[in-house]
Amino acid sequence: MTERQQAILVAIIEQYAEIAAPVGSVTLAKLFGVSSATIRSEMAKLEEMGFIEAPHTSAGRIPTDKGYRFYVNGITAAQMTELPSGIDNSTKAIEAHVNSNIDASDKAIRRAVDGLVEMTGNFGFASFGSSLYMNGMTQLFSQPEFGDGDHVQAVAKLIDNIEPWLREAAPDEPLNVFIGSENPIGKSSGATLIISKFKSSSGGDNYIGVIGPTRQNYRRTMELVRRTGAMLEEVL
């Protein structure tokens, strides 16, 4: 993939996350200062490589799971050198949730989940000890991707099985991202799991994370989940 193709793919992903509508060549041509024909040619190559696709009802393009994976790997490789706008304020808001219940670890974890839901608009969960806490169903299903029944059922299956899956998979990295069809449960859900593992005085494997549509601000959400996991590990 050329540098310009990478830049176009990033632009499609970030614009789609913001507007929830397929991104067309005219919009990208203005952004890159080239002709629409040039953009269409590059988009055709990205589509051939499997990074973007055309919805049936639109001339624009949206990212595929493969496109998102390429993008997320780029974020990981960059080690978040360029922090998302407003990330510090969002982190402080979650920290306030946690610190208000620092005397009780289970309440602190629950409030951390509530903070992630509030800051990301995703469904949040935490698995700690023998407990599972979840919140944010309304926020998740208000996303435009989850307007049809089949889609909702696939996401619900993913949520119903999150705790046994975490016990079985036990992801060991400080931050894990499972995109769309990468999810071992609900492969057709069109949902992404972003999970952080944290240690606590109670021992065992403890996780906090969010479930949201594949269309989202990965840079911001990944950093918030990572920071929240690190925050809990520090205070617990």
Image (spheres, rainbow, N blue to C red):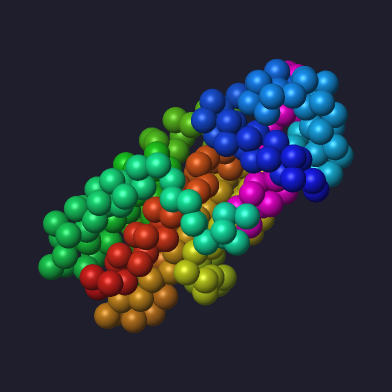
Residue 160 in view here = no
User: Where on the picture, by quarter, is residue 45?
Assistant: top right
The residue lying furthest to the front in this view is 33
Q: Position of residue 204 (x, y in %)?
A: 38, 79
Residue 119 in view here = yes
The residue drawn where x is 44% and y is 64% is 196
Q: Is residue 1 magenta?
A: no
Front residue (pair 83, 95): 83
Q: Is residue 58 magenta?
A: yes
The residue drawn where x is 46% and y is 34% is 141
User: Where on the picture, by quarter, is residue 150?
Assistant: top right
The residue drawn where x is 55% and y is 34% is 17
The answer to whether residue 166 is left or right of residue 103 is: right
Quarter of the image for the C terminus: give it: bottom left
The residue drawn where x is 31% and y is 46% is 90
Front residue (pair 134, 236): 236
- Disc count in the image? 0
Looking at the rendering, the stretch of residues picked out in magenta corresponds to 54-73
The answer to whether residue 157 is left or right of residue 184 is: left
Q: Position of residue 8 (x, y in %)?
A: 70, 36
Front residue (pair 39, 140): 39
The answer to whether residue 54 is left or right of residue 20 is: right
Identify whether 9 is placed above or below 172. above
Q: Position of residue 180 (x, y in %)?
A: 63, 48
User: Where on the picture, by quarter, is residue 121?
Assistant: top left
